[in-house]
Amino acid sequence: MMTYVKKCPECSGINLFHNKDRGEVICKDCGLVVEDKMVDFDQEWREFDSEESEKRRRTGAPMTYTQYDQGLGTEVGQKADLYRLEGKDKNKFFRLRKWQYRISTAIERNLKLALAELKRVSSYLKLPKSVEEEAARIYTLAVQRGLVRGRSMESVVAGSLYAACRRHDVPRTLDELSEASGIEKKEVGRTYRFVTRELGINILPSNPADYIARFASSLKLSAETQSQAIEILESAQKEELTSGRGPTGIAAASLYVSALIHGEKRTQREVADVAGVTEVTIRNRYKELLDRLGLEKDIKKTKKKKE
DNA sequence: AAGACGAAAGTGGTTGA
DNA sequence: TCAACAACTTTCGTCTT
């Protein structure tokens, strides 16, 4: 079973303590309750043969936020039942079905549509299930608080997904979200900020290192280049070159430099494209990196080697 | 000819009065 | 609510390989 959270969002500590009895995950460093909706996956009974297991099991499909009723809804009457009923029973059946229909409030209908859209976008971006779940949870909360009013459903879906990505350290750029959802980039950003602020979701600035792996692989760079890019990134953070700057630009520049050092040169254009920034930004970051960390000699070294 | 570089003007968002 | 501001983009001309 994969853990839900790896790092404490408050202090970034990794000493997370799973308290199964209370269904909580607690950060040992700062005491923050990181997650309080854990599901206890153990069964509390034992079964010795198939008969007992039939009798004692009482759960159905897992509960999930990606179904509009969290997978727990009741449907009145399935087709097969319909033909078995007669007279009074048949009337009863129709009455019940009508009821069921009326119970579905506007919220539920909205959720049904939205979650379909959410799944579509999520699978387009090949996002892990956990992120999809989180996004669905965020969206559900947003609907309940009436945050969708005045905004398009799609944009809130995109915003929720973006927020979920950030929380799970699987960063996708706003551009990618925008492309997948067909919502303008500004709009996605706007609703993302709005939703996270209104719901009080902590927004830790995304770590540039999280982008490296994905960028590196789409540029087909070696593992060495990749790991050096992360080293460069870390020293850049020590030099305080990273604060206030867009994380994608920094990640892109680190990769660019690292590729130069390893003789796997990529053009600024290529790197800029996968990172979703312009060459100019890469140039600026790149220059800062060379200035503050003595990297010129490393690049020259690989140049000479070539000759 | 393509890529790298840098200047200048424009954009959208944050901040602080 | 408005203006100043920082980061980033777009555009374009020049230099280097």
Image (cartoon, coloured by chain):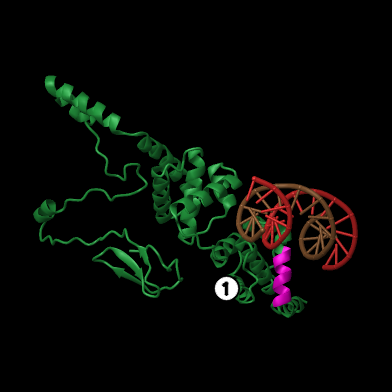
Chain colours: A green, B brown, C red
Tell me the residue that label 1 is attached to.
A227
Quarter that holds the C terminus of chain A: bottom right
Q: Is residue A22 visible?
A: yes
Q: Mostly what secondary structure, the magenta segment? A: helix
Q: Is residue A126 visible?
A: no
Amino acid type, label 1:
Ser
Is A252 left or right of A148, judged from the image as shown? right
Q: Is A210 part of what is drawn in magenta?
A: no
Q: Residue at x 40, y 37 (%)?
A: A110
- Compared to A46, does B11 lie above or below? above
Q: Residue at x 39, y 50 (%)?
A: A137
Which x, y percent locates residue A179? Answer: 57, 46
Q: Quadrant of residue A306?
A: bottom right
Which x, y percent locates residue A36? Answer: 32, 61
Q: Chain of mark 1?
A: A
Which x, y percent locates residue A132? Answer: 42, 51
Is A95 left or right of A296, judged from the image as shown? left
Q: Quadrant of residue A281?
A: bottom right
Q: Is A289 part of what is drawn in magenta?
A: yes
Which x, y percent locates residue A219? Answer: 62, 61
Give the magenta part as a residue range.
A283-292
Secondary element at tag 1: helix
Is A284 left or right of A191, judged from the image as shown? right
Labels in figure, total = 1
Quarter that holds the N terminus of chain A: bottom left
- Compared to A91, does A177 lie above or below? below
Q: Residues within 10 Å of mark 1 (few under 14, many from 20)?
A: some
